[in-house]
């Protein structure tokens, strides 16, 4: 019988946006057979856009079965803001020693979402576990769906050449984020409760989300100087620069 390597999966959903001026905790969650795989050790190496090592072969920590490394603010001081960084995790498990790579960038600020559970309750009080007509038990929260929608938003921005860290008006993304999150929740309830109204609501929120994305425009910092440009940018428009400070190429390795 042929021997096959154990196939581990690293849950790296987005490029690592490393924020200059503070400590950054980088993580590499790894899964096998549907569960977190526990690394017994490993190292991390981080390279900048010129392929110069920012850190090389540094020992990782394992916290709650997840490989973790803190990249300190001192290490990042005086480095230029740029994309094209590379993060390499060399981890050891009982079934093998895989290497995982992710692309990254050194950024001024990360983009933060503005939608919370409270925003969902305003449209659907029955989603609030404290409401008298609640559909869910006490302690329920919707963080998983909020985060999934937020990940999709950032990937959609990246795919048309808009760097999430250069979006200067996060509230511009609120409407799409809210409707797309509610679509995910409604699709979940349509199967878990068997109530047909949730399937209808899911389709309705999908339509609203699509409309919100088509109408989305936001302030942007194309030259990465910390100031918003005078011209607003539309989400669905592809961006092409021929060179200079505003050039956008997410250069993964």
Image: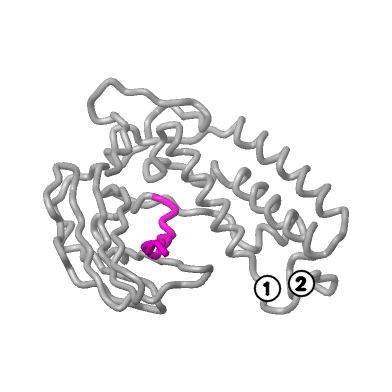
Q: Nearer the viewer, residue 62 or 180?
A: 62
Quarter containing the C terminus = top left
Where residue 89 sits in the image (x, y, percent)? 27, 61
User: Label 1 vs label 2: CA separation?
Assistant: 6 Å
Q: Is residue 164 magenta?
A: no
Q: In which quarter of the view is residue 124 placed? A: bottom right
Q: Residue furthest top?
A: 242
Span colored in magenta: 1-14
Where residue 102 sits in the image (x, y, percent)? 32, 52
Q: Which residue is mark 2?
A: 136
Q: In which quarter of the view is residue 244 placed? A: top left
Label 2: how many residues lie within 10 Å, few (<14), some (14-19) or many (20+)?
Answer: some
Q: Nearer the viewer, residue 42 or 220?
A: 42
Give the secondary structure at mark 2.
Answer: loop
- The reply to whether dot 1 and dot 2 touch (C-beta < 8 Å) is yes
Residue drawn at point x = 14 percent, y = 42 percent: 50
Q: Which residue is mark 1?
A: 140
Q: Is residue 4 magenta?
A: yes
Residue drawn at point x = 15 percent, y = 50 percent: 79
Where residue 155 sits in the image (x, y, percent)? 47, 43
Quarter containing the N terminus = bottom left
């Amino acid at each position: 019988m042929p021997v096959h390597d154990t196939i581990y999966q690293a849950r790296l959903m987005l490029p690592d946006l490393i924020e200059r001026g503070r400590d950054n905790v980088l993580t590499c969650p790894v899964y096998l057979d549907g569960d977190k795989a526990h690394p017994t050790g490993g190292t991390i190496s981080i390279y900048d856009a010129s392929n110069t090592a920012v850190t090389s072969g540094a020992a990782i920590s394992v916290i709650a079965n997840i490989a973790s490394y803190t990249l300190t603010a001192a290490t990042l001081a005086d480095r230029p803001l740029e994309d094209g960084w590379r993060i390499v995790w060399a981890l050891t498990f009982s079934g093998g020693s895989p290497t995982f790579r992710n692309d990254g960038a050194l950024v001024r600020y990360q983009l933060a979402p503005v939608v919370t559970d409270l925003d969902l309750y305003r449209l659907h009080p029955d989603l609030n576990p404290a409401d008298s007509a609640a559909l869910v038990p006490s302690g329920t929260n919707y963080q998983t769906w909020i985060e999934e929608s937020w990940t999709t938003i950032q990937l959609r921005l990246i795919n048309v050449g808009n760097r999430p860290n250069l979006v200067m008006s996060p509230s511009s993304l609120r409407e799409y984020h809210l409707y797309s999150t509610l679509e995910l929740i409604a699709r979940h309830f349509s199967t878990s409760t068997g109530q047909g109204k949730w399937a209808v609501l899911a389709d309705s929120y999908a339509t609203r989300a699509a409309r919100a994305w088509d109408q989305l425009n936001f302030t942007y910092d194309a030259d990465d100087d910390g100031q918003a440009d005078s011209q607003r940018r539309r989400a669905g428009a592809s961006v092409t620069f021929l060179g200079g400070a505003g050039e956008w190429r997410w250069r993964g390795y």
